[in-house]
Amino acid sequence: MQNMVERTARYMAILGGIVLTLLVLLTTISVLGRGLNTFGHSDFLNALSESAAQALIATGVGPVNGDFELVEAGVAFAIFSFLPICQLYGAHATVDVFTNILPPKANKVIVTFWEVVLSLVILLITWRLFVGLQGKMDNGETTFLLQFPVWWAYGLSFMAALIASLVAVYCAVAQVIELVTGRLILPHRGEAAH
């Protein structure tokens, strides 16, 4: 079970990374296009060479149509894609200034408590994403520029959140078992408990 959970979390992180990389490329192309379009319309280029300015504008260079819509949908998916690996390795940001002075057993109880709470929060978010997905499917809302159905983004985010929920529940159960038995189950969690 551990191998399957770890493999799934890694694949989701890789997929999220690929999506994020594509979004960076899209944004870069869009910003460059917007910048070249602005330069083509600039007084500086028109004064330097009106024909060069007209040639640049004639190429149709400009921002990517719907770039904001694609980035919005893609970033939401990427965030939920990274949640499983963060959950599995206990890589969420923590502040342990005051808990460092506590004994290891007390820290383990605190870590387990918050693991369960975070898992419940991820389950709540996943449920609300599903409700939102149903609402977007029912009302047929589309994006402004590209006119793709909004529920597509909700659906992709929901699938990633569903995997995050499964990993979160696994981690919560494993953390409770670790607390009760003292046996380490989760990868690289021994350091997080101290």
Image: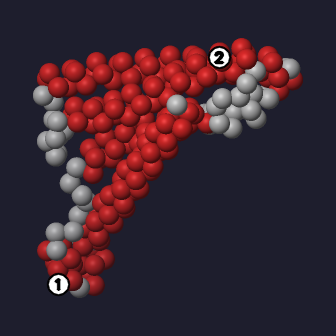
Q: State left or right for residue 153 relative to residue 19.
A: left
Please tell me which residue is depicted at 46% across the width and 39% down the height of the picture. Answer: 8
Which sits earlier in the primary sequence, circle 1 or circle 2? 1
Residue 176 image label:
2
Residue 128 image label:
none
**Which image quarter: residue 194?**
top right
Where residue 142 appears, as percent x and y from the top left, is 16, 35
Where residue 32 appears, as percent x and y from the top left, is 33, 66
Against 179, is 148 above or below?
A: below
Nearer the observer, 121 or 175:
175
Q: Disc 2 on helix, strand or loop?
A: helix
Specify few, some or many for label 1: CA neighbours under 10 Å numbering under 14, 14-19, or 20 or more. Answer: few
Please tell me which residue is depicted at 76% across the width and 35% down the height of the picture. Answer: 191
Q: Nearer the viewer, mark 1 or mark 2?
A: 2
The answer to whether one can see residue 50 in this image is: no
Specify few, some or many for label 2: CA neighbours under 10 Å numbering under 14, 14-19, or 20 or more. Answer: some
Where residue 27 appears, as percent x and y from the top left, is 35, 57
Q: State left or right for residue 81 relative to residue 39.
A: right
Q: Label 2 sits on what residue type?
A: Val
Q: Disc 1 on helix, strand or loop?
A: helix
Q: CA distance from mark 1 to mark 2?
A: 72 Å
Q: State left or right for residue 190 relative to residue 71.
A: right
Q: Label 1 sits on what residue type?
A: Ser
Please tell me which residue is depicted at 23% across the width and 36% down the height of the picture. Answer: 152
Q: State left or right for residue 25 relative to residue 144.
A: right
**Which image quarter: residue 56?**
bottom left
Residue topped by disc 1: 51
Nearer the observer, 126 or 171:
171
Where residue 44 appears, as percent x and y from the top left, is 31, 77
Nearer the observer, 163 or 48:
163
Against 65, is 36 above or below?
A: below
Against 40, is 181 above or below?
A: above
